[in-house]
Amino acid sequence: MSTLVFGHKNPDTDSVCAAIALADLKKKLGEDIAPAMQGELNPESTFVLEKFGVAGPDVVTSFAGKDVYLVDHSDLAQGPDDLDKANILGIVDHHKLGDVTTGQPLECWIWPVGCTCTVVASMYKYFDVEIPKDIAGIMLCAILSDTVIFKSATCTDSDKKVCARLSEICGENDLEALGIEMFKVKSAVEGTPIRDLVFRDYKDFNMSGKGVGVGQLELVDLSIVDNIKEDLEKDIQALKEEKGHHSVFLMLTDIMKEGTQLLIASDDESIVEKAFGVAPADKKVWLPGIMSRKKQIVPDLEKLFS
């Protein structure tokens, strides 16, 4: 039975591409391993995989009894419901260490960088394994996506250096043009069900016993969602009630203006002003310079809830 490597629920480009790349590396190091994902590909991930001719992983929802590696997450809320019945061999991630625990030592690569694929690309170098052209291409795209073409607060010099190396391997020279092409695909909303948009890049968090959901839509222009913003507001309120959460937030991030309009569904709206210093109006607030859920939204909320 193959070991499986997979990312978080509601997979994004980093979680999918990191799983594919880590499986390729581990296979070349002699492991019987395959990539998997917990949900369907989003439009950006589909574009990236098709661009470089890489097959998407199989969707797997149960991991009980399997040997697994986790990429791009280590929080139980973002893993499968039966993760406690799996044997976790390792974690490769770029977020804070979550609440996953193991009964034995494991391989662990958790770096303070902008993207899991930055870590995986560095693992290829560490193990002296050549990165294939197609794998280099998808990892490059994942880093451009997660760092918002190097504009995000999460971006580091390591991300930029790895991108320079990957671009040489895959032959993509105009990284800004590639990034904008990806974000245009990511911004597409027409014909997509509202709940699918909320879930396009959504994560649940346990903040001192309170359930908090944070979704993000990264857009080349906020006007793209003008006609559906009211529906998005209604849906995150419905989602909050369905999950029994304290709060659900949706980040509408304008990558060109470099800021986020935060839509709010909460038992206590005042936490937004306490966390970010700006008072909401009509259950929304504009946060200039805020582009990263991981570094600029979640940590400030967690401090308040603690």
Image (cartoon, grey):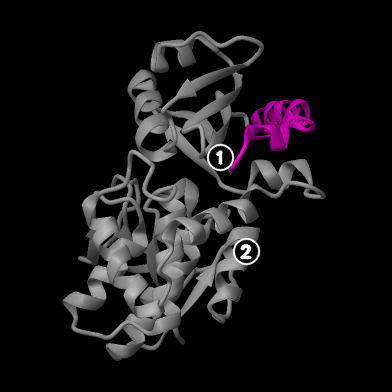
> Magenta span covers which residues?
220-243
Determine which residue is flagged by label 2.
41
Please indicate, yes or no, whether residue 82 appears anywhere in the rendered image.
no
**What main secondary structure does the magenta stretch of the protein show?**
helix
Quadrant location of residue 202?
A: top right
Which residue occupies 39% across, 49% down?
Answer: 147
N-term mark: 1 or 2: 2
Q: Amino acid at mark 1?
A: Gln
Which residue occupies 39% across, 40% down?
Answer: 294
Residue 20 forms part of the magenta stretch: no
Q: Where is residue 262 drawn, in percent x and y?
A: 56, 25
Q: Is residue 61 left or right of residue 273?
A: right
Camera-side residue of 101 and 203: 203
| Neighbourhood count class around disc 1 (C-alpha, 10 Å): few under 14, some 14–19, many 20 upward | many
Q: Is residue 164 left or right of residue 32?
A: left
**Quadrant containing the C terminus in the rendered view:** top left
Q: Secondary structure at mark 1?
A: strand
Mark-to-mark CA distance, 1 and 2? 16 Å
| Neighbourhood count class around disc 2 (C-alpha, 10 Å): few under 14, some 14–19, many 20 upward | many
Which residue occupies 71% across, 26% down?
Answer: 233
Q: Is residue 89 left or right of residue 128?
A: right
Image label count: 2
Q: Where is residue 45 drawn, in percent x and y?
A: 57, 63
Camera-side residue of 172 and 203: 172
Residue 241 forms part of the magenta stretch: yes
Q: Where is residue 25 drawn, in percent x and y?
A: 33, 81
Determine which residue is flagged by label 1.
216
Q: Secondary structure at mark 2?
A: loop
Q: Amino acid at mark 2?
A: Leu
Q: Is residue 53 above or below residue 239?
A: below
Quadrant location of residue 267?
A: top right
Which residue occupies 54% across, 53% down?
Answer: 180
